[in-house]
Amino acid sequence: MNSVIVNEVRAGFYLDSVALMRLSARLGERPAVDEAVLMVGTDSNRGIMHDAGLLTAVGRAAGPNDLVIAIRARDEAAARDALAAASEALASGLSAGAGEAFRPRSLEGALDALPGANLVLISTPGEFAVRETRAALARSLNVMLFSDNVPLEAEKALKREAARRGLLLMGPDCGTAYIAGTPLAFANAVPRGNVGVIAASGTGLQEFAVLLSRLGAGISHGIGVGGRDLSDAVGGLSTLAAIDLLAADADTAHVVLISKPPGAATAGEVFARLAGCGKPATACVFGVGPARVAAGITLSPTLKAAAEQVTGQRLATSVPDALSRDLAATLPATRRWIRGLFCGGTLCTEAQVVLRQAGLAVASNAPLPGHASSDAGNSILDLGADEYTVGRPHPMIEPAVRSPLLAEALADDECAVVLLDVVLGHGAHVDPAGAVAAVVDAAAADRPCVIASLCGTPGDPQGFESQAQKLRDAGVVLAPSNADAAALATALGRARQS
């Protein structure tokens, strides 16, 4: 059947990329609509739409300040109806209702409205993010740079400029932060406390903060630095600045670093600065052994272990061995492999650590640093990686992105365990557990075992207990943490693969 592709361009129109992704996902769910994408018409975005076969001559003529609406549908009527729905949604989003607060449309307007502000969150396409960050730094503003696709050289230049001005630049691609108790971007509702965290990871910071809250502790500040900051190319510029800030912060009693391994040249300086910060320090740096960490730093293998070490308390015990044996007994002998489908990149990495420490080989699109992806039957996928999110919402924003892969894993006769993360909090989908439960409920009765961790707190907008109950009602086994979920999956996998 031939598809109909239609484009519409809104000249001089801008809307936050997260809002555009949500609207794209809603339009894509309409009857007879195969795909819908709303993107700012930058060169890179038009290239993405062209490669996806969604661009017409109308869309190709768009400029970097325009919005492109691209629809692929099964007939002309469905395509036009989707365009009309997009127009209605965009119009309603721009119309401020009675009593709705004024929303500035520029940095200058925002500073006029809030002259005492000292931090700006920037979420624009990468092509514009560098310019906006320079403007913010020039006005003596600290920056949380949510945007990705910022060139490496530009990142280094911006971070040097921030350091010269005594400012903090979080990012680029910084998805989570807590500043003075205020959650920013993707973040859970956690109490304020005296633990300062530096994280080159959004979901790693979320999981740690959630586990810390379950132990009665809280975050003073959670500073995201971006995934490239600890590389030798960037040199840990934001991480070093963050260590100094937390060392001088009277409200911070313990400093924690969460990251994948730093570059070899950067590691020495970062660990030395952390060890010398004058406060107890913990590092959860996946793939790094004790030999690389400076004396005076406690190295934790998992986020759960880090939370326990910082507080001196124990979280709920792992899922009992008896449950592992009971689950294994229900699976046919043909089911052997573990399939991990993760929204969070760091949670994906942590799961690989647990599997590999147990001696299991793992294939992944985002292999643990220092370990090449193998051809193993076990696979752990990061669905937030570029190959799954180009032109599409991140699975934390739209969990239906994971649904086809979850259905495929549940129908795989060789799959014994499906391992999932479900992430709640500000910025996340309103019902991620419901999306998982719907797919699991539709699977055959002899499906694989589904094991999940639920990253959230009772204060999160989705409602922690109601989300947990949806998963339990669908027959999903809930573990106390991501590390525990991976450990249970590992126990099942080893029993089937031995």
Image (spheres, rainbow, N blue to C red):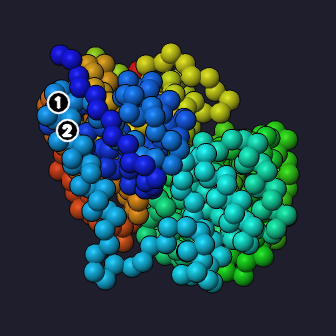
Question: Where 347 falls versus 335 (above or below)?
Answer: below
Q: Is residue 191 visible?
A: yes
Query: Tag 1: residue type?
Result: Glu
Q: How many residues crowd around disc 2 within 10 Å: few (fewer than 14), some, or many (20 or more)?
A: some
- Give the left or right position of residue 467, taking residue 132 as reference: left
Judge left or right: residue 130 versus residue 492: right
Q: CA distance from mark 2 to mark 1?
A: 6 Å
Q: Residue at x 53, y 44 (%)?
A: 64
Task: Please name the residue shown 51% across and 41% down the image.
Answer: 63
- Local secondary structure at mark 1: helix
Amino acid marked by disc 2: Arg
- The residue located at (35%, 22%) in the rendering is 336
In the depicted view, which residue is nearer to us: 441 or 139? 139
Callout 2–callout 1 Cβ contact below 8 Å = yes
Residue 458 lies, in percent from the top left, at 34, 69
Which residue is the site of mark 2? 80
Q: Quadrant of residue 3?
A: top left
| Label of residue 76 in the image | 1
- How many labels sit on residues? 2
Q: Is residue 328 visible?
A: no
From this view, report whether residue 36 is shown above or below residue 431.
above
Which image quarter is the C terminus in?
Answer: top left
Is residue 257 found left or right of 74 in the rendered image? right
